[in-house]
Amino acid sequence: MLKLATLALVGIISSTAFASEVAVDVGHTLAASGAVSARGGKEFDFNRVLAVSVSSALAERGLGVQPINFDGRIDSLDARPQQAAGADFFISIHHDSVPAELLEDWDWNGSAQTYSDRHAGFALFVSHDNPDLATSLRCASAIGARLRRLGFVGATHHADALSGRPRPYADAENSVHYYDKLIVLYRTPLPAVLFEAGVIKHRAEELVLRDPERQSRMADAIATGIAACLYVPH
Ligand SMILES: [Zn+2]
């Protein structure tokens, strides 16, 4: 009896001691809000909604969450990885635009906006300069794989020279690319991934990216991928 109780206690202690914590970063700020959607929405607002959903999904899986920049008032890019100190993994949440030369004009609800329906889909980015590229890549691939399993479609244009800013594939099947000069990915001791949920300049994709039910499925896939990759023995 004592032995069983002791074993149970050890189990509780070790599961607590090894519970992973994930730093979830909302890309951009209130003052510099990133891309503008086809309907004039701010990327920061899209990022924050999805980051909140990802945080809940991580917590449901027993993972700790360190929210970064949920108030949109962070001082600098360097402050993001600094605030992630002590976590086991860093994910920065973004929504994508396209190069300016692809944009076309349209009128939406009486306001002049720009769009491009050419590119769509999620993408993940890792950096060669990150001190733990192996874990970064393993987690990015796990996230991409879970997203695909739930029916999400990865972008195919980021490795293309015609996209204006080609990012070579790290894992083509799961839409993972190398993006080496991003401060949030390399100025950190943590494995780190930047996630682009989709292209908000794409008129149809913007609408599905605004759908709360789909946001929650996407968040579930991200959290499941992170949990799977952090719990793999290595
Ligand atoms: Zn962004």
Image: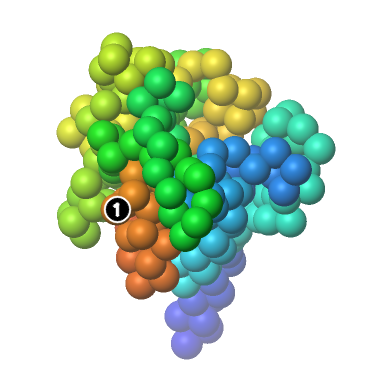
Q: Position of residue 186 (x, y in %)?
A: 58, 22
**x and y percentages locating residue 224 in the rendered image:** 35, 58
Q: Residue at x 34, y 49 (%)?
A: 203
Picture residue at 36% right of the left edge, 26% below the top: 102
Question: Residue furthest toward the top?
Answer: 161
x, y (%) of residue 184?
Answer: 61, 30
Q: Residue furthest bottom?
A: 1
Q: In the rendered view, tell whether residue 35 sits above or below residue 181.
A: below
Residue under the point 40% across and 44% down: 106
Q: Nearer the viewer, residue 52 or 108?
A: 108
Question: Horizontally, is 180 left or right of 31 in the view?
Answer: left
Please give left or right for residue 145 compared with residue 207 in the image: left
- Is residue 116 visible from the viewing direction of this image? yes
Q: Could you tell me which residue is drawn at 73 percent across and 29 percent down? A: 78
Label 1, residues with CA under 10 Å away: few <14, some 14-19, many ≥20: few
The percent position of residue 16, horizontal first and vertical second, equals 58, 64
Frontmost residue, 127 versus 20: 127
Does 10 appear above or below 168?
Answer: below
Q: Amino acid at mark 1?
A: Ala
Q: Is residue 168 above or below residue 67?
A: above
The answer to whether residue 165 is left or right of residue 153 is: right
Front residue of 215 and 139: 215
Is the CB of the residue bearing disc 1 within 8 angstroms of ligand 1?
Answer: no
Does residue 122 show up? no
SS assignment at label 1 = helix
Residue receiving disc 1: 204
Give the position of the C terminus as an image quadrant: top left
Closest to the observer: 132 or 56?
Answer: 56
Question: Can you tell which quarter of the image residue 219 is in?
Answer: bottom left
Task: Choose top left, top right, bottom left or bottom right for residue 166.
Answer: top left
